[in-house]
Amino acid sequence: MQLHSGLPCSAHGIEDQKQPSPDTESPSMEMYRSLGLQAPGRKVAGSPRVLLLVSSLVERSVEKSERLLELGQRKDALTIFHGVRAPALSVCQYIDRIYKYFGCSPSCFVMAVIYVDRFLRNTEVLLTSLNVHRLLITSMTIAAKFMDDAFFNNAYYAKVGGVSTSELNRLELKFLFSIDFRLQVSLETFHCWCLMLEKESAAACEGILVHIEWPKQVLPFDKAKEVSWTEIDDNPTCAPPLAG
């Protein structure tokens, strides 16, 4: 599966309100539980499985894009999301870090992937090791603020992502304009992406690349969700951007 190179939660960003009850036994709910997309108020033991699948999808998409660039089959458009070098943290480590400190619902990771796909479809940008981290922190910031009842401010999210607050503000605005502020996701689209993540699980195990065309309260960062600003380590720092 590849991002275009081109709900089982209180998801305000999902359009279809006729969602199944969290207690309804259905194939869809079984899949959501398997991914770790818990219903409101329910805890997931350990890291949700969706994190691993999103990491795998993104990493394999980066590999595909960079092969195309190396072969000269595609050209990449430089944007403010591109850094001068790839960060030290892998995509998997970066996503784990976001999950650890964001405290957002796991469904936000599915929404973020959908947003990144929309961004890639609307631009000439390829997903590479130079832009993937900034696209992830930006899409996750937008998803968390759009989906969840309580969220942090950009100063907190920027520290988690290893960028400055002013830079994250610019990235968020650029991202939103690039997707025409289309943040709503239909239940059918959300379900389709969950199915594709399940296919990614099977493809990753077999080593096969599945090609797919494809009023809230802002809490102070030092009090929200019982995570202190000082508890965030400063290890992951994105390299300076290529474009200002």
Image (tube, rainbow, N blue to C red):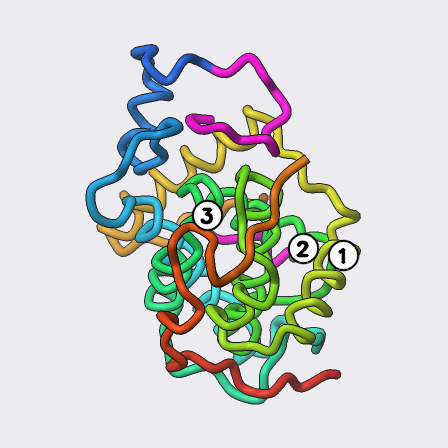
Q: Earlier in the sequence, mark 1 or mark 3?
A: 3
Q: Main secondary structure of the magenta part?
A: loop
> What residue does disc 2 label?
119
Other-residue count near label 2 (Cα within 10 Å), few / some / many at <14 / 14–19 / ≥20: many
Q: Secondary structure at mark 3?
A: helix
Disc assigned to residue 178: 1
8 inside magenta stretch: yes
> What residue does disc 3 label?
109
| Label 2 – label 1 distance at C-alpha | 6 Å
Amino acid at pointer 3: Phe
Amino acid at pointer 1: Ser
Q: In percent of the image, x 53 and y 65: which residue is there? A: 156
Q: Secondary structure at mark 1?
A: helix
Vertical arrangement, residue 97 with respect to residue 233, above or below: above
Coordinates of residue 98 in the picture (x, y in percent): 41, 60
Other-residue count near label 3 (Cα within 10 Å), few / some / many at <14 / 14–19 / ≥20: many
Disc assigned to residue 123: none
Coordinates of residue 161 in the picture (x, y in percent): 49, 70
Q: Quadrant of residue 41?
A: top left
Asked if labels 1 and 2 touch by Cβ distance under 8 angstroms, the answer is yes
